[in-house]
Image (cartoon, helix red, strand yellow):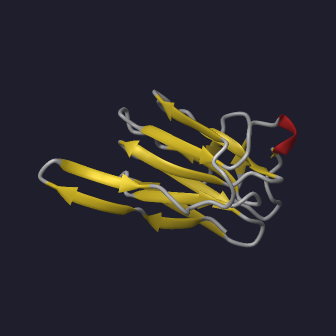
């Protein structure tokens, strides 16, 4: 199940330093970020192997996840928050603020065969055409 962490942060008069370590298993293999997403909904998948850690470096966004039994909705609003998605966590990200930069750290390289695009049958209704979450 997706788990929200508060990252260790050291604050001083010279600014803040937030540390990302020991958060996902294995070695970090891939890092990417999403920005200027507007009203888009991103993701709409889960994985066979990849663990992903999401940090909204600036701005905010919403993340919906469902592992087949439980669902969560998390609003990422500070770079001190890190949402870890396990491979079985089907997820979408939306409600990006205009200034949102969402950092994604993964323990796997990109592999198109690692992606599962079909949501769990008992998850919230998901309109594939518009990529919108129904509340």
Name the side, left or right, on which 72 lies relative to 55.
Answer: right
Q: Position of residue 127 (x, y in %)?
A: 71, 43
Q: Is residue 40 above or below residue 72?
A: above
Residue drawn at x 62%, y 60% as measured from the top left: 24
Q: Foreground: 70 or 54?
A: 54
Is residue 80 at least partly visible in the picture? yes
Instruction: Work out whether 121 lies above or below 43.
Output: below
- Percent coordinates x, y for residue 58 in the rendering: 35, 41
**Residue furthest out toward the front:** 27
Residue at the limit of the structure toward the top, as seen here: 36
Q: In which quarter of the view is residue 69 placed?
A: bottom right
Q: Quadrant of residue 65?
A: bottom right
Q: Position of residue 103 (x, y in %)?
A: 50, 42
- The residue at the far right in this view is 113
**Eyeballing the image, is 58 above or below 79?**
above
- Residue in the image at 62% along x and 65% along y: 2
Q: Is residue 61 visible?
A: no
Residue at the spot 56% in from the left edge and 62% down from the top edge: 23
Is 109 or 88 nearer to us in this picture?
109
The image shows a total of numbered marks equal to 0
Q: Where is 115 relative to 74, above or below?
A: above
Q: Quadrant of the N terminus?
A: bottom right
Asked if residue 37 lies left or right of residue 11, the reply is: right
**Percent position of residue 101, x then y:** 43, 37
- For the point 52% across and 33% down, the residue is 34
User: In this image, 37 relative to 88: left or right?
Assistant: left
- In the current view of this chain or complex, which residue is farthest to the left? 13
Q: Quadrant of the C terminus?
A: bottom right
């Amino acid at each position: 199940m997706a788990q929200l962490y508060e990252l260790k942060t050291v604050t001083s008069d010279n600014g803040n330093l937030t540390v990302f370590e020991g958060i996902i298993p294995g070695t970090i293999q891939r890092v990417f970020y999403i920005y200027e997403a507007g009203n888009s909904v991103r993701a709409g998948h889960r994985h066979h192997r990849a663990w992903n850690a999401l940090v909204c470096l600036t701005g905010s966004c919403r993340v919906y996840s469902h592992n087949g039994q439980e669902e969560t909705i998390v609003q990422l609003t500070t770079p001190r928050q890190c949402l870890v998605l396990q491979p079985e966590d089907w997820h979408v990200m939306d409600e990006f603020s205009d200034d949102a930069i969402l950092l994604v750290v993964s323990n796997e390289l990109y592999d198109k065969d690692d992606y599962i695009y079909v949501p769990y049958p008992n998850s919230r209704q998901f309109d594939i055409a518009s990529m919108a979450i129904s509340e």
